[in-house]
Image (tube, rainbow, N blue to C red):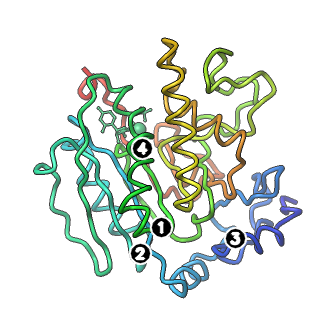
Amino acid sequence: MGVCPSATMSLLRDNFTGALRPWARPEVLTCTPWGAPIIWDGTFDPDVAKQEATQQNLTIGLTVFAVGRYLEKYLERFLETAEQHFMAGQSVVYYVFTERPGAVPRVALGPGRRLRVELVVRERRWQDVSMARMRTLHAALGGRLGREAHFVFCMDVDQHFSSTFGPEALAESVAQLHSWHYHWPRWLLPFERDAHSAAAMARGEGDFYYHAAVFGGSVAALRDLTAHCARGLAWDRARGLEARWHDESHLNKFFWLHKPAKVLSPEFCWSPDLGRRAEIRRPRLLWAPKEYRLLRD
Ligand code: UDP
Ligand code: MN
């Protein structure tokens, strides 16, 4: 049975349990070796999680970068579907980071939901746009975003919500299992292997391969995470290095050193290209098809 031995401990540490019942999904791993829940559809009660969050009158931040052609291509659908599915009924503040504030689509927002646009400079290479997010997020979390939100999720824009993504996903720090890699043997996982990189992981290191398209946590935890990653990225750059998967490599190093308090199953960020799988019951976020030639030249 996939019962988390320290489920009770996690209940005490974490107020947004949504009445965890890891035994409801015996066919998948529902607990990490360090006792953090891995939440799959059916292992929590979304209504209980919702009540818990409402009682605490939380404000939840959602950050997203839409720079260059990613803005026209993805932002509107991302925001429209977030209005339907992301933390419905809670107070939410979107932070959209872009170099063209005037081009941000006007999406009708529900009550208690706000959208703020933050200006960023456009980096030339797409890898640099992606990597610069850590430094920018760190600054934002130290400013207004950090003052107005209790918990924050940071997401890629090239995806859309397809089902409930609610307070059951909240915790002090939250990592997303990568849908391509969740069932791969550890030695095959695409961690950074160059020992000179700040993101380096030795063979045998690494718990899971996490996807940088979704991570979250408290403001304090995310300040630490973004500081760590921004520092690692700057260290590598000063040495002429670039980790294999950019900011994601550094994120994986951070979560190896500082274990996440909650892990989201691949249902929370699923790649439709992988087709149907029995354990993927209800995908909550779907990757858009990769159209790199259109977006990245
Ligand atoms: N991004 C952007 N403009 C760019 C490159 C990246 O806005 O030119 C942002 C966007 O939010 C995107 C994220 O950075 O979702 C990560 O880049 P991408 O999704 O292309 O990386 P992948 O998911 O393919 O690793
Ligand atoms: Mn992406």
Q: Position of residue 127 (x, y in %)?
A: 38, 25
Q: Which badge, 1 or 2, comes first in the chain's sequence?
A: 2
The amino acid sitting under disc 2 is Ala
- The residues bearing labels 1 and 2 have C-alpha atoms spaced at a distance of 8 Å
Residue named by callout 3: 14
Question: Which is nearer the eye, 143 or 102?
Answer: 143
Residue named by callout 1: 164
- The residues bearing labels 4 and 1 have C-alpha atoms spaced at a distance of 15 Å
- Residue 297 sits above or below residue 55 on the image: above
- The residues bearing labels 3 and 2 have C-alpha atoms spaced at a distance of 20 Å
Asked if the residue under mark 2 is in contact with the one under mark 1, i.e. CB atoms within 8 Å, the reply is yes
Quadrant of ligand 2: it is: top left
The amino acid sitting under disc 1 is Thr
Name the residue located 48 percent from the left edge and 83 percent from the top edge: 57
Name the residue located 76 percent from the left edge and 24 percent from the top edge: 187
Q: Nearer the viewer, mark 2 or mark 4?
A: 2
Task: Pick the quarter of the image with the N terminus.
Answer: bottom right
Name the residue located 54 percent from the left edge and 88 percent from the top edge: 55
Within 8 Å of ligand 2, the CB of disc 1?
A: no
Residue named by callout 4: 287
Kindly identify which numbered label has been placed on residue 297: none
Q: Nearer the viewer, mark 1 or mark 2?
A: 2
Within 8 Å of ligand 2, the CB of disc 4?
A: yes
Q: Where is residue 73 in the image (x, y as percent from the top left)?
A: 22, 42
Q: Which badge, 4 or 3, comes first in the chain's sequence?
A: 3
The amino acid sitting under disc 3 is Asp
Total marks shown come to 4
Residue named by callout 2: 88
